[in-house]
Amino acid sequence: MTLSRLDIARQFAEKHGLDLLAPLVIGGNYVPATEHHGVVYVSGQVPRVGTTVTALGRVGEAVSLEQAQAAAEVCALRVLAILEQQFGLERIAKVLKLNVFTQSAAHFTQQSEVADAASNLLAAVLGHDSGPHARTSVGVYQLPKNAAVELDATVALR
Amino acid sequence: MTLSRLDIARQFAEKHGLDLLAPLVIGGNYVPATEHHGVVYVSGQVPRVGTTVTALGRVGEAVSLEQAQAAAEVCALRVLAILEQQFGLERIAKVLKLNVFTQSAAHFTQQSEVADAASNLLAAVLGHDSGPHARTSVGVYQLPKNAAVELDATVALR
Amino acid sequence: MTLSRLDIARQFAEKHGLDLLAPLVIGGNYVPATEHHGVVYVSGQVPRVGTTVTALGRVGEAVSLEQAQAAAEVCALRVLAILEQQFGLERIAKVLKLNVFTQSAAHFTQQSEVADAASNLLAAVLGHDSGPHARTSVGVYQLPKNAAVELDATVALR
């Protein structure tokens, strides 16, 4: 039996205690995603599960690389939850771009390794045709709610 | 009498001493906005009124949340000024994405609240159909001219 | 004799010891660029020549403005190398958006001047019709591999 993208995403989500079909809370006057001519712009996601941000503080200090990678997985799963709820994961033709922001200690330079956790998850869920994406990873000074990681995505639908 | 989008934008602009129809000064070798197949990419705007940047320094230290929110309004008005001058505000079908960068103190985590000021202004000017947008808010370490806030936008035309 | 875009780009690349046609190494689970309906999203580029990142540390401290500008040129050349190898530089209709991230000292505020080096190079290679772009420049706290500068681009093909 072939697993659907949603099945695979749910396996990852369960590991983090995240319900992909739960209503998404937005912390401001904006929307989870917009769509125009088949291109979807997904809002920046912090690693929130329910009402809890799962990793708080600077990566390289309060937060380890491994904890940041787990947080990046949660962010990526929230992107997938939004896409599932608004469009359906099967409609994703390609992840065009991923932007990953890591709240960094002064000398933490493994932002790419943090982002890889999100990239790997997207590839696992969406497969070799739709998952590979362009990416930008930077180290920022702070993030909303003191989140350790935030990421957003631009996605093409079919 | 129904107010046009430009009328509403001008009411906000007057509060900040900003003239939406004044020529926009660009501080580098780039353009205020590009357009391709009805999608407009607007350059990052700092809160400049005339030759003055209205909020300088880190939000949470030199700059209060309220001052940063006022600065975010100026940035959003500058985006609208560019769109008005190049395309006309009535042609905006939808704000697709807003990226908001707040020069943050080490422990300032209300980047979303800063960004809300810009989002609220866009919703007030463009209305419920065209205003709501996807958004990413991050806290950066510095910004050009020591500006407290910078934002850019991707916009669909009709 | 008219120089092609590749000819001009190579003249800049030689100055930095960069081979535009050498295979590009990607440091993570993503791709150099994605394309959808003629719009290309190029991944964030640090100023790597071969296996060396040419400018390491904070601009305004370990790295001078001039060194950062040279690094921004290398980043822009890497964007052009990706575009040449995947699509051919002659197919670039317009650079739509450039995002420039400068690893900044606490009081370094010349992020626009760093970005100008990249913008000038793109204009020189692609000409007045295709080169001018929208741009966002911010100062970040860290970058992958401790790079001083990183930039990405969105580009329209013809």
Image (cartoon, coloured by chain):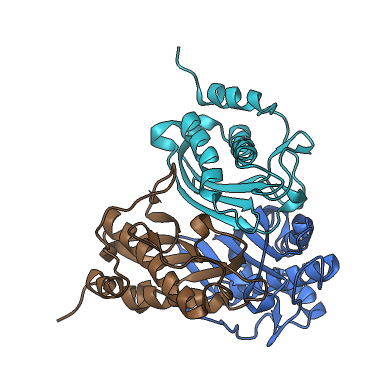
Chain colours: A blue, B brown, C cyan
Tell me residue C116's x, y (percent). 51, 41
What residue is shown at x 55% (from left), y 54% (from top)?
A: C109
Tell me residue B50's x, y (percent). 32, 59
Judged left or right of residue C94, residue A78 is right
Front in this rendered view, residue A103 or C9: A103
Judged left or right of residue C35, residue B153 is left
What residue is shown at x 64% (from left), y 49% (from top)?
A: C60
Judged left or right of residue A36, residue C49 is right
**A34 in relation to C2, above or below:** below
What residue is shown at x 67% (from left), y 61% (from top)?
A: A100
Q: Quadrant of the N terminus of chain B?
A: bottom left
Q: Residue furthest left?
A: B1
**C145 in relation to A76, above or below:** above
Front in this rendered view, residue C127 or A61: A61
Tell me residue A143's x, y (percent). 64, 71
Quadrant in the rendering for residue C18: top right
**A43 in relation to C77, above or below:** below
| Total numbered labels placed on residues in the image | 0
Front in this rendered view, residue C154 or C59: C59
Q: Quadrant of the C terminus of chain B?
A: bottom left
Q: Is residue C44 visible?
A: no
Q: Is residue A93 visible?
A: yes
What residue is shown at x 46% (from left), y 34% (from top)?
A: C123
Tell me residue A32's x, y (percent). 54, 75
Q: Residue furthest bottom?
A: A51
Q: Residue furthest top?
A: C1
